[in-house]
Image (tube, rainbow, N blue to C red):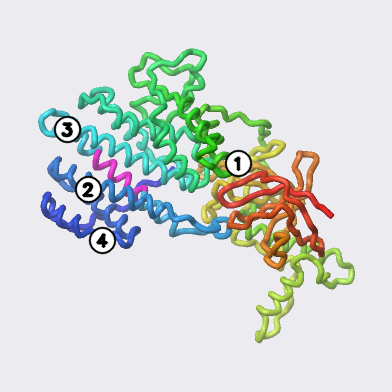
């Protein structure tokens, strides 16, 4: 669960609390340093929320700050992290997201404070349009906070859903105002449908695309007081007086409770499917797969092809492409060293010459040292190695409990699970366990992987790192290669350097595509 803003100290406001002085300050606001500007607005909101301010002055301040804050948080959380498969440690990224979430939450708190004042309940102080904007912008602030929390794979903080339902009740249960506009309903639908998209199956960048897309299509969702009996268990519900997210109903739901509301998102899923197969939109392979996963989630059609069996098995996990390449090369070197009965290293073995050269370079001009044991060379724990626990498995997948707080995996990352052999897979979803550990869903791709070099036939001297996976008939996995999604596209015919020689292969089709990696089926040709 996301931690609430720990900042308790208030900073003095950079303006006097009146309309003219605030507008003078706002006109001179410098936004060049976006992260610093976001932090400044956060402290202003924290201070305002502890300061007595006239309602209309507070509303003026919020209506000026809100669009600027939304733009800032969108920009600072949009910056793509190039090669996230190479660098799992990114403390600055978390700081940026924390400021973005806390700022949006404090903005929503400010709107909530206004909505709870006596003046808001009267029809003489605020116009109906002002009340509508206040409620809508409060929901939009919570919606942005939900996006940023989802991109960290965190569950919403306590009272998040209570605040969402509070704003919706103001307009639609006529607790304080009488307003029938659609802007409030649409903002509320956006929050619900985005949550129902099962965001933990997407990478952070994909979540942003999903969020924007549902901003257009969530208006087609239906908020119902009753649902047909045959659709009862498949239509998520909320209780507008409880701090609980949308979930599938159970038999104990009081269908006559006026605060029970059902969310039907089938029409939204239909719009998403139309977009996925719309040839004029020119979707990439990645986009189409993402849209199909989104549509499936919105129809609550999330059944597995193969049932998972509970297990409780420890193993070692290696995350990210670069570390897997290094691990596979070390394995090949260790195997070559161990297999040689005379004790010398086969210089033709994969990675051996590279390792020796690196060791010589590291020791140049240094005092002689005692050679380390072989186990010390090959079994040193790398920063990306994590001891994890398998909690369930199936024919082509498994669930993993990830206790490491320093390394933060993302959907679309490649992962290696080492037991008797190294099993390579893609991370397909993430979620937080009750014990605050991370649960990971892995789609397994194969074993007996090799670190290789790959090049296009037209540019044989331009090689990139890749992972080779041999054919496995037992689980119907074809011969394939994994490459980083960094601009390299295999030609129809490619060269693969493995087993001491260059081999010519034909690329057959793309099997998987994520934000970070591509997997291609290949066959060897003469």
For marks 1 and 4 on the same chain, the one whose residue lies earlier in the sequence: 4
The numbered mark at residue 64 is: 2
Q: Which mark is residue 30?
A: 4
Mark sitting earlier along the chain (2/1): 2
Q: Is residue 197 magenta?
A: no
* Residue segment shown in magenta: 101-111
Q: Secondary structure at mark 1?
A: strand
Q: Would you place residue 407 above or below residue 441 in this image?
A: below
Q: For the stretch drawn in magenta, what is the main secondary structure? A: helix
- Asked whether disc 3 touches disc 1, contact meaning CB atoms under 8 Å apart, the reply is no
**Mark 3 residue crowding within 10 angstroms, few (<14) / some (14–19) / many (20+):** many
Callout in the foreground (1, 4): 4
Q: Residues within 10 Å of mark 2 (few under 14, many from 20)?
A: few
Question: Dividing the image into 4 quarters, which one contains the N terminus?
Answer: top left
Find the residue positioned furthest to the front: 280
Q: Which residue lies at the image location 66% right of the left edge and 33% below the top edge?
A: 308
Task: Identify the mark nearer the N-term, 2 or 3.
Answer: 2
Which residue is label 1 attached to? 441
Q: CA distance from mark 2 to mark 1?
A: 43 Å
Mark 3 or 4: in front is 4
Tags 3 and 4 touching, CB below 8 Å: no
Q: Give me the disc on residue 120.
A: 3
Q: Nearer the viewer, mark 2 or mark 1?
A: 2
Residue 250, image x and y in percent?
48, 20
Where is residue 442? Give x, y as percent: 63, 43
Tell me which label, 3 or 4, sits earlier in the chain. 4
Give the CA distance from mark 2 to mark 3. 19 Å
As helix, strand or loop, the secondary structure at mark 4 comes to loop
Residue 431 x %, y %? 52, 41
Circle 3 sits in a helix, a strand or a loop, which is it? helix
Q: Callout 1: 10 Å neighbours few (<14), some, many (20+)?
A: many
């Amino acid at each position: 669960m996301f931690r609430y803003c720990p900042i308790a100290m208030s900073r003095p406001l950079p303006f006097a609390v009146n309309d003219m002085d605030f507008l003078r300050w706002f006109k001179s606001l410098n936004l060049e340093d976006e992260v610093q500007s976001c932090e400044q607005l956060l402290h202003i909101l924290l201070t305002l929320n502890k300061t007595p301010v006239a309602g209309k002055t507070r509303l003026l301040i919020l209506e000026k700050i809100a669009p600027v804050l939304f733009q800032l948080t969108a920009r600072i959380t949009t910056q793509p992290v190039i090669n996230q498969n190479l660098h799992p440690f990114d403390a600055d990224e978390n700081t940026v997201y924390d400021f973005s979430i806390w700022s949006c939450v404090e903005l929503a708190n400010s709107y909530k404070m206004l909505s709870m004042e006596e003046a808001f309940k009267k029809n003489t102080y605020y116009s109906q349009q002002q009340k509508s904007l206040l409620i809508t912008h409060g929901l939009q602030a919570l919606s942005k906070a939900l996006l940023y929390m989802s991109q960290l794979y965190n569950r919403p903080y306590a009272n998040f859903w209570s605040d969402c339902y509070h704003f919706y009740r103001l307009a639609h249960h006529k607790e304080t105002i009488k307003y029938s506009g659609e802007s409030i309903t649409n903002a509320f639908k956006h929050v619900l449908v985005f949550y129902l998209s099962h965001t933990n199956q997407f990478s952070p960048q994909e979540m942003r695309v999903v969020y924007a897309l549902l901003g257009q299509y969530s208006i087609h969702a239906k908020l119902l007081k009753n649902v047909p009996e045959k659709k009862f268990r498949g239509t998520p519900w909320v209780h507008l007086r409880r701090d609980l997210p949308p979930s599938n109903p159970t038999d104990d739901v009081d269908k006559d409770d006026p605060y029970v509301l059902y969310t039907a998102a089938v029409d939204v899923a239909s719009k998403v499917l139309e977009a996925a197969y719309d040839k004029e939109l020119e979707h990439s392979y990645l986009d189409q797969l993402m849209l199909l996963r989104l549509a499936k989630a919105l129809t609550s059609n999330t059944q597995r092809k193969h049932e998972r069996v509970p297990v409780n098995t420890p193993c070692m996990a290696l995350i990210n492409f670069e570390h897997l390449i290094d691990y596979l090369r070390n394995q090949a070197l260790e195997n070559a060293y161990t297999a040689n009965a005379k004790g010398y290293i086969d210089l033709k073995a994969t990675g051996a010459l590279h390792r020796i050269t690196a060791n010589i370079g590291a020791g140049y001009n240094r005092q002689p040292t005692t050679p380390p044991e072989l186990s010390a060379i090959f079994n040193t724990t790398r920063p990306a190695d994590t001891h994890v626990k398998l909690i369930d498995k199936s024919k082509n997948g498994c669930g993993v409990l990830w206790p490491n707080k320093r390394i933060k995996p993302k959907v679309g990352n490649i992962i290696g699970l080492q037991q008797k052999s190294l099993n390579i897979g893609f991370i397909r979803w993430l979620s937080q366990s009750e014990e605050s550990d991370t649960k990971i869903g892995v789609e397994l791709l194969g074993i007996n992987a090799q670190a290789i070099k790959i090049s296009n036939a037209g540019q044989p001297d331009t090689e990139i790192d890749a992972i080779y996976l041999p054919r496995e008939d037992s689980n119907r996995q074809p011969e394939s290669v994994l490459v980083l999604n960094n601009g390299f596209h295999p030609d129809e015919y490619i060269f693969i350097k493995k087993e001491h020689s260059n081999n010519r292969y034909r690329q057959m089709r793309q099997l998987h595509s994520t934000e970070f990696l591509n997997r291609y089926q290949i066959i060897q040709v003469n």
